[in-house]
Amino acid sequence: LDDLSDFQEEEEEEDEQRQEATTNSVYDDEADGNDDGGGNAKTTGDNDSSLDGSDDAAASNSQPPSRPRLLDDLSLQRHLSLIQSDQDSKPSADGPATTNNTNATDRDQDRQQNNLILQSNRHLLSLTHEIQRTHLHLRKLYHPKFPELEELLTEPFQYRQAIGILQNEMDVTLVNDRLNDVLTSNQIITISVAGSTTSGRPLTAAELSRVNDACLYLDRLQRTQTALRSFVQSKMERWAPSTCALVGPAIASLLLSATGGLAELAKIPACNLQLLGKTKWTSASRAGLATQTRVQHAGYLMECELVTGVPSFLRMKALKAVAGKLALAVRADYVNWE
C-alpha cells in the first residue's frame, strides 16, 4: 500500500509538471501572436491612413466629369453648315428624279438631298434624346427651389419658360402677369397654390447660374431642332408625297424626326403611329388642366386636319382611320423611293 501511494503521488507530480509546461507554452504563443498582431495592426493602420489620404486627395483634386454636349459634336455642326449652304443655293426643280433621267448632276443632287434628309432625321432623334437629358438635368438643378414645379409642368420647353420667369422669386403671385404669356390660367392657379406651400428654398448665386446655363443650352437645342425640322419639312413633299398628301408636311416631318427616317417609320404598325409624340401626363399636371383639352393615347396625328375637322366625339375613330391609312402611305413612299 505504501508503494502504491508513493506511485500515485509521483504520477500526480508529473501531471502537474506537464500542465504547467503546457500553460507556459500557450502563454508564450499568445505573447508572440500579440506582438505580430500589433505589428500587423500598425501596418494595416498605416495603409488605411495612406489610403484615406489618397482618397481625400483624389476627391479634392478631381471633379465629376461634365457630360459631353450634343451641340458640340463636330458631325452635327458640319451637317448644319451643309443645310445652310443648301438653303442658300438655288433650289432644284420639284419632283423626284425619274428612272429615265440621264443627267448625272441631277442624280448626284438627288443622292445628296436624300443623304441630308436621312442625316437630319438621325440628328433630330439625337436632339430629342438630348432635350430629355437636359430637361432632367434642369429639373435636378431647380428642385431645391421649387420641387413641385417638375410635376406640374412635364413639357421640357414649358418648364424652361416658367423657370426663366420665376427664377429665385419665392412669391409666385408677383410674376403671374408674366406667366400669362407662356401658361394657361389653370396652370398659373395651380402653380400659385403649390408655390405658397412649397418646401423649397432660395437658390444661391452659383446654383442659379447653373440653372440659367442649362436654360440657355435648352434654348439652343430648341433652335437647332426647329432648323432641322424646317429643312426636313421643306423636302418632305418631294421624298414622301403620299404621306404629305395625307397628313401634311409638318406632321410628316414630326413623325420622321420622332422615328429617325422613312425606313424606321415604315416598320411601325398603325396602332403605334397614333401614339408618336404623345405627351406624358401626371396626376399633378392634370390637376390644373381642363379635361376637354386633354386627349389620351394621342400624339402628333391628333393635330392632323383630317382629325381636327370632325366632331370631338368622332376624333378617336378618325385618328385610328388616319393611322391605318398612314401606315400604308408611308410604306408606299418607302418602296417607291427604294
Image (spheres, rainbow, N blue to C red):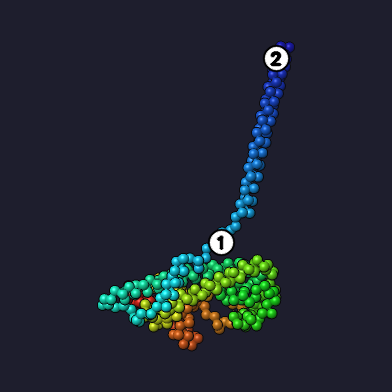
The residue under the point 50% across, 66% down is: 72
The residue under the point 64% across, 45% down is: 50
Residue 201 is situated, as x and y percent measured from the top left of the image, at 69, 69
Residue 219 is situated, as x and y percent measured from the top left of the image, at 55, 73
- Residue assigned mark 2: 7
Q: In screen coordinates, is 107 left or right of 223?
A: left
Label 1's element?
A: loop
In the rendered view, would you say 276 is above or below 67?
Answer: below
The residue under the point 64% across, 39% down is: 43
Q: How far apart are marks 2 and 1 (CA)?
A: 89 Å
Q: Nearer the viewer, residue 66 or 27?
A: 66
Q: Which amino acid does label 1 sit on?
A: Ser
Task: Decide which of tag 2 and tag 1 comes sooner along the chain.
Answer: 2
Residue 173 is situated, as x and y percent measured from the top left of the image, at 69, 79
Label 2's element?
A: helix
- Residue assigned mark 1: 66
Residue 297 is situated, as x and y percent measured from the top left of the image, at 50, 76
Q: What residue type is labelled 2?
A: Phe
Q: Looking at the image, can residue 8 be seen?
A: no
The residue under the point 36% across, 72% down is: 112
Q: How many labels does the image show?
A: 2
